[in-house]
C-alpha cells in the first residue's frame, strides 16, 4: 500500500494527489493507495481518502504502508523513519499557496542530503522517483535528541 499524508495544514495541497492519480492512470501505481487529505478537496475512485484521523490510526496506516508520500513536516517524516519506511517527501510551497513560507523545502533538503528520504520537488517527476524508491535503502535515522539533552544538562550543572 502507498500511504499519502498531507498533514493538518489549513491550506490545500492537491499537487501530489493529482500526480499520484496520473501515475495510477499510467499504470505506474497498481496497488492500494490511501490518502489523508486534510482540508484538500479531492476525490478519485482509485484513491481511498479521509480528512483527518487520530494519531493511532495514522500510525497503524504507516505500519501497513510499503511507501509513504508525505508533506515536509518533521514530525511525520521522523515517525515514518522510526518505523523504517521508505519515504518520498513533497514539500508544501509558498508559490502554490500551500504554506506561508518554504520551510518545508529546507526540511526536505536536509533529510534528503542525509539520505533518509527521497525528495520530490517537482510532481512531474513522480514516475521516476517511484522507480527509485523500489531500490532505495534509506540511512537508518538516529535522533540527536539525547545528545542535545545531555549538552543542556552539562550546561545547567556548570551553572
Image (spheres, helix red, strand yellow):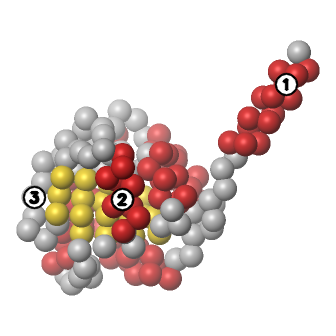
* Location of residue 139 (image quadrant): bottom right
Q: Which circle, 1 or 2, is nearer the viewer?
A: 2
Marks 3 and 2 in Cβ contact (< 8 Å): no
Q: Can you name the residue that lies furthest to the right here?
A: 158
Please give left or right for residue 117 compared with residue 98 in the image.
Answer: right
Going from N to C along the chain, the mark reached first, 3 or 2, is 3
* Residue located 10% across and 58% down the image: 43
Against 120, residue 152 (above or below) is above
Q: Which residue is mark 3?
A: 43
Q: How many marks?
A: 3
Q: Which of the numbered marks, if any, corresponds to residue 155? A: 1
Q: Quadrant of residue 20?
A: bottom left
**Image quadrant occupied by the C terminus:** top right
Residue 103, x across and y down, in percent:
47, 40
Q: Secondary structure at mark 3?
A: loop
- 133 on left or right of 22: right
Q: CA distance from mark 3 to mark 2?
A: 22 Å
> Mark 1 and mark 2: span between their CA atoms?
39 Å
Disc 2 is placed on an element classified as helix
The percent coordinates of residue 64 (x first, y second) are: 36, 68
Amino acid at each position: 500500500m502507498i500511504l499519502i499524508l498531507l498533514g493538518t495544514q489549513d491550506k490545500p495541497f492537491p499537487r501530489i494527489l493529482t500526480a499520484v492519480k496520473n501515475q495510477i492512470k499510467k499504470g505506474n501505481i497498481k496497488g492500494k493507495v490511501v490518502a489523508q487529505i486534510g482540508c484538500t478537496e479531492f476525490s478519485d475512485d482509485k484513491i481511498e481518502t479521509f480528512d483527518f484521523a487520530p494519531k493511532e490510526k495514522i500510525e497503524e496506516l504507516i505500519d501497513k504502508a510499503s511507501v509513504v508520500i508525505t508533506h515536509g513536516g518533521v514530525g511525520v517524516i521522523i515517525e515514518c523513519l522510526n518505523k523504517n519506511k521508505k519515504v518520498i517527501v513533497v514539500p508544501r510551497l509558498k508559490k502554490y499557496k500551500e504554506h506561508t513560507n518554504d520551510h518545508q523545502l529546507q526540511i526536505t533538503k536536509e533529510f534528503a542530503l542525509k539520505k533518509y528520504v527521497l525528495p520530490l520537488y517537482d510532481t512531474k517527476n513522480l514516475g521516476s522517483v517511484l522507480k527509485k524508491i523500489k531500490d532505495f535503502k534509506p540511512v537508518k535515522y538516529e535522533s540527536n535528541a539525547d545528545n542535545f539533552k545531555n549538552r543542556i544538562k552539562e550546561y545547567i550543572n556548570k551553572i
